[in-house]
Amino acid sequence: MTDLSTNLSREEGPALADYDYDLPPGRIARYPAAERDDSRLLVVSRTGGGIRHDRFRDLPRWVAPGDLLVLNESRVLPARLLGVKPTGAPSEILLLRPAAEEKDPRLWEALVRPGGKLKPGREVVVSPELTVQIVDSAPGGGRIVRLVTALEPREAMERFGHVPLPPYLDREDEPLDRERYQTVYARVPGSVAAPTAGLHFTTELLKSLEAKGVRVSRLHLHVGVGTFRPVETERPEEHTMHVEAFAIPEETAAAVRGVREAGGRVWAVGSTVVRALESAATQGKEVRAGRGETDLFIRPGFGFRVVDALITNFHLPRSTLLMLVAAFTGYQRTMEAYREAIAAGYRFYSYGDAMAVL
């Protein structure tokens, strides 16, 4: 990997290799902090100046009265099903999204393992109360599966499913992950990965922000498995972005409009909120309420219409998430911040520390 101090020399913008960096061993946070808001917070100004070190519980000192904090209230599904084939061989099903929810809520798009063995017509027994039938193939190596159970599909997942932790945590899910790999405000089931910037918030912290005069609004964007897929093209603009579903309530669109008219800042809690808001923005910077799907790929050169400040975690090298942060913060400024975080011993990735970009 290249060093973070490498100077970007390409006039056309960063190439994939420019988003590489060395993370010292042991710096991946495999477990959450003892308390959600005890995470560290790196505070970065987009306009220059020093980089500040703080604790997440002190976020209210950086968010002004009249600002708007937008949260992603998508809830992580226990979508990882572990079972066996009739031969006794272990198998795994990762449910991604309903395939035909109105016609047959038991049909789901899924990823399966071992993919070469689980062809249409095969079955995986998860428990005496749940069998998964492989119905058909799907694009990208996926499958259409049917949940065979007397239970409602979501109830079956809650009973027999596992939290789909990111592979870089290098461990199986544990009871604590049912609570901690979920934001305290998660309400709408549908994600296979947590909107991790929100994991640092407590109910008390949100109340303290509102008591200060900060408005809090919600939307949801269901995080898909594509968030973990690396960029493999040397030129980032050649990468095909994954599609994710989102919904913005009318009250959230109105709150954005009102705060912008009053001169306040719109804070996006996480890259998912950025993608939803910017996808719904018109040329006149108006955020439209409603449902939609987005494959918006935000990278340096993108013109932000809505978001004024960002709360985010530290992301994988060569990832679209890191590119989004670089687009918002500036490439050089982002790499400077990552260099500072590494030197100061910050914890990285989903259960790691956070960064606020003002």
Image (spheres, helix red, strand yellow):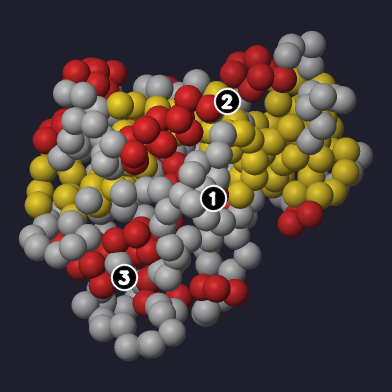
Residue pictured at 40% horizontal, 36% vertical: 256
In the displayed structure image, the side of residue 355 where residue 257 appears, left or right: right
Mark 1 or 3: in front is: 1
Residue 282's tag is 1
Residue 331's tag is 3
Q: Nearer the viewer, residue 297 or 155?
A: 297
- Answer yes or no: is residue 169 visible: no
Mark 1 → mark 2, Cα distance in angstroms: 28 Å
- In the image, is residue 28 above or below residue 73? below
Residue pictured at 21% horizontal, 77% vertical: 5
In the displayed structure image, the side of residue 65 where residue 245 appears, left or right: right
- In the image, is residue 319 above or below residue 309? below
First of labels 1, 2 by sequence position: 2
Residue 189's tag is 2
Mark 3 → mark 2, Cα distance in angstroms: 34 Å
Residue 270 horizontal/vertical position (percent): 38, 43
- In the image, is residue 304 above or below residue 198? below
- Answer yes or no: is residue 81 visible: yes
Residue type at the position of mark 3: Tyr
Residue 205 horizontal/vertical position (percent): 22, 23
Residue 331 horizontal/vertical position (percent): 31, 70
The quarter holding residue 134 reads top right
Label 3: how many Cα within 10 Å (few below 14, some 14–19, many 20+): many
First of labels 1, 3 by sequence position: 1
First of labels 3, 2 by sequence position: 2
Residue 102's tag is none
**Secondary structure at numbered mark 3:** helix
Residue type at the position of mark 1: Thr
Residue pictured at 51% horizontal, 48% vertical: 281
